[in-house]
Amino acid sequence: MNWEFKNSTATWQAANGLKPFSFQNGNLLTEVSALDPYLFIPDATFKVENYLCAELKMKIALSGVTKPGVGNTAGGIFWITDTDPNWAEDKHTVFTIQPDNKFHLYKIWFHHNPKWTGTITGLRIDPIEDAVGGEKLEIEYLKIVKYADYTDETILAYSHAVREN
């Protein structure tokens, strides 16, 4: 599964806390306008089977305003399935972001979550979980990657890192 934003939303929608999308250099651009910003795709239908993780290429620029005690360092991906169509925390994976106005490739691993099963019918990206408004986002692509695309060493290294943290 692959969504590139070459001057098209690829059916992704700004659902909460995001200004309308625009495009530049083939990337999706938006700005945070409220707390709990997210975008989602309501028709992302695929069987989980051997899909292991997501690769999200994105950059985030902070607004200069921060919430006291908040590090602005987490993003998340939620999913819904054909048997569980409600967005919920148990169908959610958190990843660490670097809001330094530079592109980063984030690998978001799903296979450790027991709810990553069956047929996915929707995906939601929470690009910055502790947003305050004014953060600028630019997304180049989101890919859902199969097991075969990774070596056993990559998966093993990830598994060790998860157990150590």
Image (cartoon, rainbow, N blue to C red):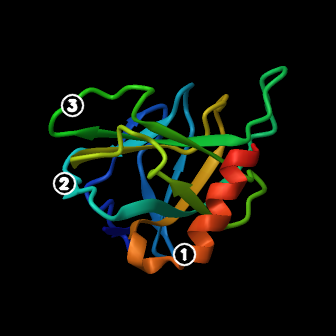
Q: Which mark is residue 136?
A: none
Q: What residue is shown at x 16% (from left), y 34% (from top)? A: 83
Amino acid type, callout 1? Asp
In the image, residue 92 lies at what x, y percent?
46, 36
Q: What residue is shown at x 81% (from left), y 38% (from top)? A: 64
Q: What residue is shown at x 26% (from left), y 45% (from top)? A: 122
Q: CA distance from mark 2 to mark 1?
A: 27 Å
Closer-to-camera residue (70/83): 83
* Residue identified by numbered label 2: 45
Amino acid type, callout 2? Thr
| Label 1 neighbour load within 10 Å: few <14, some 14-19, many 20+ | few
Q: Secondary structure at mark 1?
A: helix
In the image, residue 128 sits, relative to residue 16, either above or below, namely below
Q: Secondary structure at mark 2?
A: loop
Q: CA distance from mark 3 to mark 1?
A: 32 Å
Taking the image as shown, residue 159 lies to the left or right of residue 18, namely right
